[in-house]
Amino acid sequence: MTPFYWALGAACVWGFAPILEKIGLAKIAPFPGLFWRSLGVMVGALVLLVLRFAEIKPALAVPPSGWGWVFAGGMLASIVGQIFFYHALKGGEASMAVPVGASYPLIAFVLGILVLGEKFTFAKLGGVGFVMLGVFLLK
C-alpha cells in the first residue's frame, strides 16, 4: 500500500474510534475511560507482539536515544492528550470535539519549522489554514 492509503486507513479508524468512546463515556467518567482505553492498547500491543514476534529482538535493540523520544510522545499523546480529549468528548458533541482535537496540524506545522528545521511552504500553510478554518466554523 502507498503512504496515502495507509493514512486514509488511519483516518477511517481514528474517525470511527471516538464514536465508540463517546458511547462508552456516556456511562463512565473520563479517567476510568482512559484506564480502559489504555488497557485496550496494551492488549492490542501484546497481540501485535505475538503476531510480529520475529521483530521483537530488533525492537529491543533500539537505543534509548530512539525509543525514549517515542515513549515520551506516547505518554504525552496517549495519556495527557487523551484525557483532555475525553473531557471534551464527554462534555460536548463528537462532531465538535473530534475536529477541534484534530487541529493539531497547526501545532505540528509550527513546531516542525521551529524545532525540526522543516521547510516552510505555502502549500503546508494553506492546508493548516483550512484545518483552522474548519475548527473556527465548528466553534
Image (tube, rainbow, N blue to C red):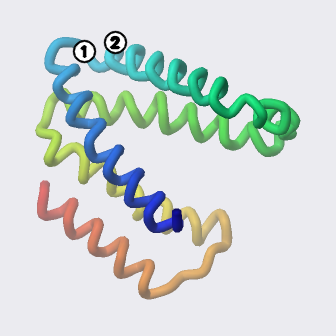
SS class, disc 1? loop
Q: Which residue is mark 1?
A: 29
Q: Position of residue 109 (x, y in %)?
A: 49, 67
Residue 107 in view, yes or no: no
Q: Nearer the viewer, residue 90 or 15?
A: 15
Whether pointer 1 and pointer 2 mark residues with C-beta atoms closer than 8 Å, the reply is: yes
Q: Position of residue 113 (x, y in %)?
A: 58, 71
Residue 32's tag is 2
Q: Nearer the viewer, residue 21 or 105?
A: 21
Q: Is residue 48 above or below residue 8?
A: above
* Type of amino acid under label 2: Pro
Q: Is residue 77 left or right of residue 55?
A: left
Report the number of numbered marks: 2
* Type of amino acid under label 1: Ala
Question: Disc 1 versus disc 2: distance between alpha carbons?
Answer: 6 Å
Quarter of the image where one finds residue 49: top right
Residue 73 in view, yes or no: yes
Q: Position of residue 115 (x, y in %)?
A: 64, 63
Q: Nearer the viewer, residue 21 or 64?
A: 21
Find the residue positioned furthest to the bottom: 122
Q: Is residue 54 left or right of residue 23?
A: right
Q: Residue sitting at 16 percent across and 47 percent down? A: 96
Q: Residue sitting at 56 percent across and 31 percent down? A: 75
Quadrant containing the C terminus in the rendered view: bottom left
Q: How many neighbours does mark 2 have within 10 angstroms: few (below 14), some (14-19), or many (20 or more)?
A: few
Residue 1's tag is none
SS class, disc 2? helix
Q: Residue sitting at 23 percent across and 29 percent down? A: 20
Q: How many neighbours does mark 1 have within 10 angstroms: few (below 14), some (14-19), or many (20 or more)?
A: few
Q: Is residue 83 above or below residue 2?
A: above
Q: Position of residue 54 (x, y in %)?
A: 78, 33
